[in-house]
Amino acid sequence: MTSRTAVRSEENSRPAAPGARRRRLTAAIGLTGTVLSLTGCSMFSPPQVLAPYDPSDGVSASAGDVLIRNALVVAADAHRPGVLSAFISNTGDRPALITVSDGSGAPPFGSVTVAPGQRVTVGSTSNDSDDRSLPSPAGGSIEAAPPEPAWVQLPDVPVLPGLTIPLTFTIDGHRVPVDNVPVKLPCFAYRTLRPTPPAGATGSASTPQPVQCQPTTGEVGPDA
């Protein structure tokens, strides 16, 4: 019995064959490389949660108690009139005056006044929102009246839909330039934003231009 135990102990103490050692070393190197590559991905790629973005078609801006959300311009073509679409809220205790311009020093396209604790939907002619929650300075939300309608029209949009233009929002004297305001076609959710001001609004009227919002029957895309 003692001799068999001694034989097994001697076999277990023998060094591994060169081929086995190479296989174990290769596996260890491969595992280390995988761990390092995964670590490198997270090291050189900053967490997306830290990069602010606008979860909507438009862009955002703010100054003090005034928040501008989902700002974009709707136009049928380049060098045609356009309509500003945006949502503006005022969580302060004083009225806020917001003017919209191209930032060149030319007269503004229009202005909007937002009462304390109220909201305005720019590009709307009716109170068509059921959401009455308004962010409060202390966190949470407060109840507010339905958004008031407002209309701001651009006399000439210099780029095609799908591109962006710079706009400057002046909020109670504070200039807030926004360089990448998207230009959208008057289609789908924006189909009612045609550059014809409602009664009493300022801005140049424009004859509605036919817009094709989707491919016609039988049309083939360029990649087909």
Image (cartoon, rainbow, N blue to C red):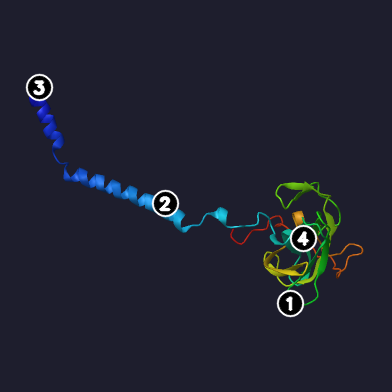
Locate residue 87: give its quadrant: bottom right
Badge 4 is on which residue?
85
Badge 2 is on which residue?
38
Give the amino acid at mark 3.
Answer: Met
Q: Earlier in the sequence, mark 1 or mark 2?
A: 2
Callout 4 secondary element: strand
Q: Earlier in the sequence, mark 3 or mark 4?
A: 3
The Cα atoms of the two marked residues, 3 and 4, are separated by: 92 Å
Callout 1 secondary element: loop
Q: Please say if 142 is above or below 51.
A: above
Could you tell me residue 6's position as x and y percent? 10, 29
Could you tell me residue 142's position as x and y percent? 77, 47
The Cα atoms of the two marked residues, 2 and 3, are separated by: 52 Å
The Cα atoms of the two marked residues, 4 and 1, are separated by: 21 Å
Badge 3 is on which residue?
1
Q: Please say if 96 is above or below 204.
A: above
Give the amino acid at mark 4.
Answer: Ser
Callout 3 secondary element: loop
Give the amino acid at mark 2.
Answer: Leu
The Cα atoms of the two marked residues, 2 and 4, are separated by: 43 Å
Q: Earlier in the sequence, mark 4 or mark 1?
A: 4
Dot 1 surroundings within 10 Å: few (below 14), some, or many (20 or more)? few
Dot 2 surroundings within 10 Å: few (below 14), some, or many (20 or more)? few
Callout 2 secondary element: helix
